[in-house]
Amino acid sequence: MDVVFMFPGQSSRYPGMLGKMCALRAENRAIVERASRLLDWDLERHFAGEQPFHRNVDVQVGVFLTSHLFLETLQAAGVTAEISLGLSLGEYNHLVHIGALSFEDALLTVRARGEAYDAGPRGMMASVQPLDLATVEAVIAEVREQGVVEVSNYNSPTQHVLSGEHAAVEAAIRVLEEEHYVQTVVIERQVPMHSSLFRNVAVAFRRYLNNLNFTTPSRPYLPNRIGEFVARPSRETFVQTLAEHVHTPVLWRRSVEAVVARFPDAVFVEVGPLAVLHNLLSRRWCKRPKFFTDGAGDLSEHLAALATRLHAGPIGARKEVSCTTP
C-alpha cells in the first residue's frame, strides 16, 4: 500500500490545539520553542489565549505549526509516506515533507503570507454541500450583479467553496439555502482567499517568494493550483504556483484524483487538526481507505492505534482503486 499524507488548510483549527500537541511530546514543545525564537513570538502562550485566531497570520502560523507537529509525531512512531499533498495552507506542510522547503523557511513564509492576507481586501468565504458544480455556477451567475463571487475551492464532486465580496457571497448563500435546500457554512468572514480580489495580494507575496531558497524535492510535488504531479519542478515553478495559488482556485478534487490514478493502492492519512479532509473523501467519490490523526479522546492512544494499523500492512480491497463522480 502507498500511505499518502494530506495536510489541511486554515479552516482546520480550534483553541487549544497547539497546547495539546506540546503536552503530547517533549519534542513537540521543543519545536514550538524553536519556532517562537525564530518568529520572536511566544507561540505557546499566544495560542493558549482567548482569541488565538484574531488575525489571519495567527491562523496560518497556528495551523501550519500544529500540522507539522502531527507530522513529527507520526514519523517518530515510524509512520512515513512518500506521497503527500496539502490543501491551500497545507501546501506549505507538503513542501516541507517533500524537501522543497526547510521547516524554518516554510514557517517564515507562512507568517509573511498571513501578513499579506491581513493587508488585503476584505471579503468572505462559505462552503456549499451537497450540490453539483453546474448548479453552484448557475447560482453564482444569478447573483453576480451583487459583486464578486467565485468558486475558490473545488473540493469534491458535491462540495465547493465560494469566495468574494460580502454582499455577493451572502446573496449566493440565500439562493442556495432557499431554492436548493443545501447546507452552507461561512468559513471565513475577513479574507476572500483564492479569488480574483486577491490578485494584488499575490503580487506583493510573490516578492517574498522570489527570495526563498527552494531545493529539489526528494518526493513528488503535487500543487493544488494545478491538480497534477509536476516532474522536476524548478525554483521558478514553485514561485509561480505559490503566487498564483493566492488568487486562483484550489483544485483539491483534481489533486486527490491524480494521486489515486498514479497510486491505486493509496491509503490517505490526514495529518493535522480535525478531520476535514478525511470527511471530504466520501465513499461515493473516492473509494480508498482513510484515516485522521486528531482525536477528541486520548490523543496518545489514538495515534498509537493508528500507527499500529498502518504498520499492519495492506488495507482495503484491491478493487477499490478509483475516484468517481456520484
Image (cartoon, helix red, strand yellow):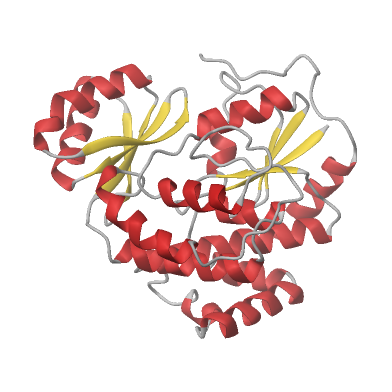
Q: Is residue 15 visible?
A: no
Viewer-side residue, 66 vs 112: 112
Residue at (55%, 61%) from the top-left corner? Answer: 64
Occupied quadrant, residue 257 = top right
Occupied quadrant, residue 17 = bottom right
Q: Position of residue 162 (x, y in %)?
A: 31, 37
Residue sticking out furthest to the left: 145
**On the picture, is 77 further left or further right than 173?**
right
When the figure is inspected, residue 295 is found, relative to residue 269, above or below; the finding is below
Residue at (43%, 52%) from the top-left corner? Answer: 243
Residue at (66%, 73%) from the top-left corner? Answer: 22
**On the picture, is 19 further left or further right than 290?**
left
Q: Position of residue 306 (x, y in %)?
A: 78, 46
Q: Quadrant of the N terminus?
A: top right
Residue at (53%, 71%) from the top-left corner? Answer: 108
Viewer-side residue, 205 vs 112: 205
Q: Position of residue 86 (x, y in %)?
A: 58, 46
